[in-house]
Image (spheres, grey):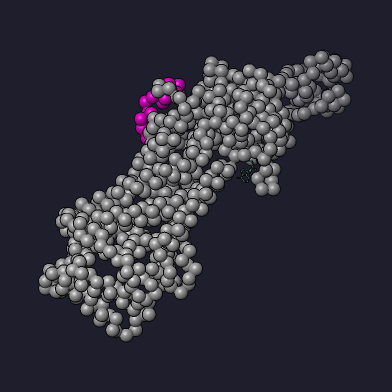
Amino acid sequence: MINLVYNEMIKIVRKRRLLIIAAIIVVLVALFTYAQMKRVQSLQEQLGTTDWRSQLQQQIIDTQNRLNSSGLSEEWRKFLQIRLQQQQYYLDHDINPSAPGAPTFMRMFAENSIDLFIPLMVMVIAADLVSSEASGGTIKLLLTRPVKRWKILLSKYIAMILSVSFILLSLGVISYFISGVVFGFAGWTMPLLTGFSVQGEELDTTNVHILSQWKYLLMEFGLVWFVSIIVGTLTFMLSVLMKSTAAVMGIMLAALISGTILSNMVSSWESAKYLFMVNLRLTDYVSGMAPPIDGMTLGFSMTVLAVWGLVALMISFLVFTKRDVY
Amino acid sequence: MTNGNVTLVVKDLRKKIGKKEIIKGLSFELKKGEVFGFLGPNGAGKTTTIRMLVGLIKPTSGQISLCGYDLHREFSKAIRQIGCIVENPELYPYLTGWENLEHFARMVPDIPENRISEVVELVGLQNRIHDRVSTYSLGMRQRLGIAQALLGKPKILILDEPTNGLDPVGIREMREFIRFLAEKEGLTVLVSSHLLSEIQLMCDRVAIMSKGKIIRIDTVEHLLAEQERVIWKVEPIEKAKSLLEEETVIIGEEDGTLVTYYEADKLSSWNERLVKAGVKVSEIRTKLPTLEDLFIELTGGETID
Ligand SMILES: Nc1ncnc2c1ncn2[C@@H]1O[C@H](COP(=O)(O)OP(=O)(O)OP(=O)(O)O)[C@@H](O)[C@H]1O
Ligand SMILES: [Mg+2]
């Protein structure tokens, strides 16, 4: 089995997939670091001070102003109110929510890329794991070895998990070092609040507690990893079912993008919450953002994702071990 | 079930895809050290049969046993006996030839360290083995494909159209190499082809396939000898024709000659009859038909490209 996984890893590495992904991450992180730097600068110019308290105060005033303006949709108003409560909480308790620093940047980068960017990178690895063997004809050589088919597929699945873990690790490392150069490397022990939950329109703060940033980060990266594995598994299934890598990518891309769109507009279509793509933003539960549909919780979303993943895995193995190869 | 010499046994093999029966009950046995040819026109079912033999597709019914191991009950042991190329020799283009071989060697238990260099030498690919496969010519890929097939020291080698796309020199080399493997290394080799001359030159036995059935299995010599022809150069041709028709079947007629089947004990009496009737017989010669003639006869003139 180790030999088989080793084979698969060699193929992924020699196809330069990991290198390309790392390069994309470097470029994007550099881009966002720059954007973040500009934002901080312009905020400072606007406020004429570097004091985060007045920044936060300013944000609160901004939010209040937007709340007072007319023509706001009900959902948006609700969201802003929750946000306002949260910001007020930070201010009252003297906690800087976005103290720049590499760990903070890492956290924000992970939170913002969990539902599209990271799944996209995972897709690049997983989409052609099986379909490329089928379209390249090498599947015939692979399946005429004295190895059971399920073992071959399992080795590919393990290789996918390893690659996904590698991607997340490099995402962490790259974003830490690049942003660290600009914002400094400090901030691991900064206290953050978590445990917000949204009950109807109220921000429920009964479970709110303080967590140092490194624990918070660990938690979020755990969730990002979980989401990545599920997206990887779904892509993997499509890759088993289809010969064309382009088709696999197309379908996954459509699903992911529709997920980000749906999240913004499905609050009244309740059963949409069973779709995997509206459940991808697991980190929002940690940071206390309102879920797209009432009643969604971290446990709920993880269960939905796990079910989708398990079903996909079962289909993959059933089809792969039974199928005639032409 | 098998004696020591039989390496591959197929019994009543059938395959249905959808409602269409593509393979309609094949049975044959292959022996150690022989080159066996699968000959058939496009769409006869050669590739489909080979895919079943190597476990890529599941037969609807029938049995396949390789060196005594049933392919479906003892897959790993059975498949260990086989090396194969199905259709084109497709390898990983982004790896070097050597890495490809390493890759497949890792999938088979206990392949000795030096086996890779051994097979590379056997197929004569030493000079380019560390280049990427994407830079290989078709002939080199074919060789690498064979090297890959030989890696696990198989007892049976299955090659689907091994000479497809090779130049004449390449074809001859491939042919000699296949004969070498069978004669010197004692492998059983199964090759498929729709090139009749190929099969004729390299195989010991042939199965002629058409529309999912085997219509003949025999040694190449038998198939040809049995159908040896006689060519008569006679005058007047019309008279000779009517006389010969009473004795045998006339299978051809072209510029002053008639072609009949050969029957050793009757040839002189036919001749006598012609001469007595005043026909001038200026030449009688026998001729071996090409497998091509035979093939067209057997498949009823189906096109073969
Ligand atoms: N996946 C499939 N679905 C349906 N029919 C198929 C499939 N694969 C093959 N066939 C049919 O099975 C028959 C045999 O095909 P096969 O590829 O075995 O022929 P072949 O003898 O290898 O021909 P060729 O000399 O052209 O390679 C053909 O009529 C083909 O149309
Ligand atoms: Mg074929």
- Residue at 44% in and 47% down: A128
Q: Which residues, given as a range, are shown in magenta?
A: B116-132
Q: Is residue B156 above or below residue A58?
A: above
Residue sticking out furthest to the front:
A206
Depth order, front residue of B58/A153: A153
Q: Is residue B234 visible?
A: yes
| In magenta stretch: residue B124 | yes
Depth order, front residue of B119/A253: A253
- Residue at 73% in and 36% down: B300
Q: Position of residue A26 (x, y in %)?
A: 26, 52
- Residue at 71% in and 20% down: B222
Left or right: residue A87 versus residue A76 is left
Q: Is residue B123 above or below residue B134?
A: above
Q: Quadrant of the C terminus of chain A?
A: top right
The part of the image, by quadrant, that contains residue B22 is top right
Q: Quadrant of the N terminus of chain A?
A: top left
| In magenta stretch: residue A220 | no
Q: Position of residue A289 (x, y in %)?
A: 33, 68
- Residue at 28% in and 80% down: A66
Q: Is residue B117 visible?
A: no
Residue sticking out furthest to the left:
A49
Depth order, front residue of A201/B108: A201
Q: Position of residue A277 (x, y in %)?
A: 43, 62
Number of numbered discs visible in the structure rendering:
0
Q: Position of residue A62 (x, y in %)?
A: 23, 78
Q: Is residue B205 above or below residue A312?
A: above
Depth order, front residue of A69/B178: A69
